[in-house]
Image (cartoon, coloured by chain):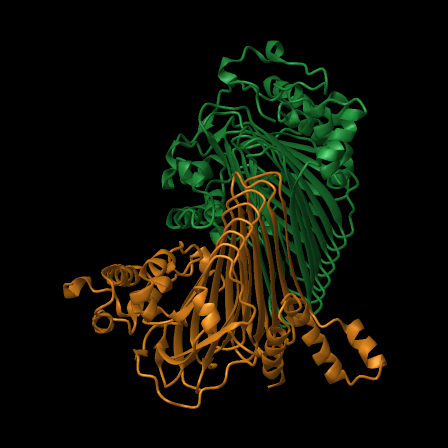
Chain colours: A orange, B green
Amino acid sequence: MPASTLPAKSTIGSFTAEAFAEHLATQNGNPTWWLERKRAAYEKFASLPMPARTNETWRFSNIGTLALDGFELTRTALIADYPAPPNVGPTAAALAFANNAIEKRQPVSDTLKARGVIVTTISDALVAHADLLRNHFMAQPQKLGSEKFAALHTAFVSDGAFIYVPQGVEITEPIVISHYATGANKAVFPHTLVVAEENAKVTVLDYFVSADSGTHFACGANDLYASHGAQITYVAAQSWSPTTLSFQLNSTVVRRDARVQSLNLHLGARQARHESLSQLQAPGAFSEMLALTVATGSQEFDQRTLQIHQAPNTKSDLLYKNALNDSAKTIFSGLIIVDQDAQKTDAYQSNRNLMLSEEAEVNSLPGLEIQANDVRCTHGSTTSRVDPEQLYYLQSRGIHPKAAHQLLVFGFFEEVLNRLESEPLHAALRELIETKLKT
Amino acid sequence: MKPLSDPETLAPAEEAAVENPSVGIDQSAGNFSYDVTYEFDAGTGLNEKTVRYISSVKKEAQWILDFRLKALKTFESMPLPTHWATKDLENIDFNKIRYYLSQGQKPKRTWDEVPDDIKNTFERLGIPEQERKFLAGVEAQFDSEAAYSNIKDIVAKQGVIFCNSTEALREHPELFRKWFGKVIPTSDNKFSALNSAVFSGGSFIYVPPGVKVAQPLQAYFRINAENFGQFERTLIIVDEGAEVTYMEGCTAPKFSTSTLHSAVVELVAMKGAKIQYITVQNWASNVYNLVTKRGLAHEEAEIKWIDCNLGSRLTMKYPGVILKGRKARGEVISIALANDGQHQDTGAKMVHAADETTSTIVSKSISVGQGRATYRGVVHIPKHLKGCKNNTECDALLINTNSRTDTYPAITVRGDQHAVQHEASVSKVSEEQIFYMQQRGLTEGQAMSLSVNGFINDLARQFPMEYSVELKRLIDLEMEGSVG
């Protein structure tokens, strides 16, 4: 590329053509389609502008702080004391990645392996399960504003989790994937891909955490694909360091009579953008989208969701709850789209915000675009503080005001946690929330 | 209401009048135009010369001309807001629009002085003789200039000033200049800038302290020339403890090309004042109706917008209230009906700027055929305020399988001292209700009309009686042929 047409430094930051060439060299030996996709993605990333103030998909977001400068890529995992993932009891399999490289693995049992269950790394899948990966990896459209960052992810991703559950196989114990970032200014690109074939059932916990207090750049994505009658429970707990810039881009495809429940817990990062796209593609599909955010200090959590009902008789239910303290800021921007032929859609979207400080800021944009008439679509958004009457009641029962307050805040989150079937998962998330609330 | 057929092929109004036996109203009323000889015509297109021409015809003071010229620059420099609004805005050809037409006559004081042909227009629009007598004042904007204004003695005796914008800026600059362009700055949006450059007509009202105007003041706007953009400017100032209700209605015959209506309405409610502003918009289905309406509510004041949009091709209108004083209250009641080829993009804007301010938004929309109704709202509570409340409810009713509705609220709240809630629902007419009514002998169409009227009934009741009756009839009309 001649020097004059080089994109401005600010639109690519540290992710220069040289950095990409260096990364691509590490991918030698992988299938051609993979390298081609990466090249195309890098070009797209470099050519797309940074989000601008006038972009509706970035309304209310702090755009000035999205700088991509000062980060470096590394595949070398620095051996350190990695914090243990939340304790969810026995696991069906586990993978731990540190700075984009596999660090530890607990393979699936021989029984599950014999039935065709695959829990492996993307780098392994590129060799052994190329077709599956090719069909599902970042295969869905980006519709929520982060095309640029999705392209960046595809360009630089080097590893991640690949989970495949064949037809009719039900895995009761959760699969735990941990993604660590460690060392100052490291960029990580975590990826988790879950494919559940017909009537399969799987639960996955994705855990994102900084192993030290360094500033990280995390640009992650996950693809969930539930085939006919499949059931996926996907829980993501994000606990990056308080100076990290984080992107999490989710795509969920729900086929006939399938059901996907996803719960995103947001605790860490300086600025965290989460985009979640659910496509309900065939009758009977159901997507339950849940999120909990504990925002403190000057954190900004920016959540964008899209529920697309593409077929009749589909259902989606979204509940995003944010608790805000200090001068934290949250943005919830959700949209339900009901396509023209998607009659008998049942869609719900709710954003509840609990204000715990005078400086906190909530932005809520619950949207609907409905093009079919025989539907049941409602949405709601509320913003308020801890109910003084409830507080008074607890105090009148002899509970200390501070404890009463805390109880009510925990209670605020319970409504969402109660939707989880797995008791150990519920307990693990509750503990993460309580730990953050108490600090 | 929508015309039955292309107006150009219509015979004279009398012959074309189609009596509808079931609802008993004339569907072609309002669907005609007169040949009017205009004394002043700014021609098509917009440039500095147009603005100077308008200003000189109106014999305006230098500051108004300066204001207009500055606004023109702002208009030219601002892009169309298509990054969030519909791309249909790009179909407006600003160069083909006439920005000023006037017969040049002075606003009339009594009904007798109104030229016969204009009187005729009102006759045809069905303002009954009897009803006129009850009207406190009529300020009818026939094209650019007010053709008739009748301020009832009692209103004038109370010290109320009710005149058109030209007259007000000439004769009462000390009253109006202070607030003119202050609630809605020129650069608020591209269309408020356009209005600021070429405005003519519209009402200016001042109600002195403590005066409660018993009857509603009314204005009636009508576009009578093809390709004519109508840019009225209204400013209502209600002084401490005073109260007024203002009603405006608008219609236009359907011309073969689209036309533009772009008004700016500013309300100022001083301490403890109350303003109620009622609009029934029924432009022809090729009018772009892009209106900016905002009120400023001081301490304990109350501003209520009742906004009903039935006509136009595209309406973009989000009446707002800036709650500037402690305990100020703002309310928007919005009814929108979108039929084939129509997009009603309406909503509300509530900006809380003082403690203990409250706001309420209730929006109900009905989409018929391929009509599209959009709710867009802003609720803003900045930091360091206490005890602000907002409650928003949006309900959408979809009549046909391909009808469309959108909801785009934006809520910003800072601090833990407030309570804000938003709720929206989308539904269709209940099959069970229709079945029940049919079983009691109603036709499906009648049942549908009844059901739709029931949907908006609680809001329609807040309109003055004659408006709510008219509204009901219009809905009956729109619902015809929508079933099956």
| The one of B64 and A174 positioned closer to us in this rendering | A174
Residue A316: x and y, percent?
58, 53
Residue at 71% across, 29% down = B449
| The one of A125 and B235 positioned closer to us in this rendering | A125
Kindly tell me whether residue A177 is visible in this rendering: no
B147 is higher (above) or lower (below) than A190: above
Residue B72: x and y, percent?
41, 46
On-image quarter of the N terminus of chain B:
top right
Displayed quadrant of residue A247 = bottom left
Kindly tell me whether residue B458 is visible in this rendering: yes
| The one of B431 and B421 positioned closer to us in this rendering | B431
A386 is higher (above) or lower (below) than A165: below
The answer to whether A423 appears left or right of B434 in the picture is left
Residue B431: x and y, percent?
71, 34
Displayed quadrant of residue B113 = top right
The answer to whether A262 appears left or right of A393 in the picture is left
